[in-house]
Image (cartoon, rainbow, N blue to C red):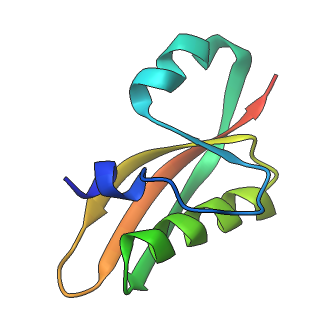
Amino acid sequence: MLVGALALAVTNVYAAELMTKAEFEKVESQYEKIGDISTSNEMSTADAKEDLIKKADEKGADVLVLTSGQTDNKIHGTANIYKKK
């Protein structure tokens, strides 16, 4: 599943933390949703993940949770972003 592949470890220098849905459910009460982000036309899952984390950082998010992913020729992904309350 692409969402799982996007969650694989990739070195980044961003502040936003990528969490799985299961991880986020444990701390959800500490955060408020501030939006949704997406990426498209990426060549690898690592590129898609890095782009999503970068976009989350740009919007001031502390956490992002992947919500979808596709691999129709190029990789597309979406995530919800959250800020600590």
User: How many discs mark residues in the rendered view?
Assistant: 0
Position of residue 13 measured from the top left corner of the image (x, y, whole percent): 77, 63
Q: Residue at x 43, y 58 (%)?
A: 78
Q: Identify the image quadrant of the C terminus.
A: top right
Vertical placement of 67 versus 22: above or below? below
Position of residue 84 measured from the top left corner of the image (x, y, whole percent): 79, 28
- Answer with left or right where residue 62 lies relative to residue 44: right
Position of residue 36 measured from the top left corner of the image (x, y, whole percent): 55, 53
Quadrant assignment, res 63 = top right
Vertical placement of 58 versus 16: above or below? below
- Answer with left or right where residue 82 lies relative to residue 75: right
Q: Residue at x 21, y 74 (%)?
A: 71
| Most foreground residue, 21 or 13 | 13
Vertical placement of 39 versus 26: above or below? below
- Answer with left or right where residue 82 lies relative to residue 26: right
Quadrant assignment, res 77 = bottom left
Q: Residue at x 49, y 23 (%)?
A: 23
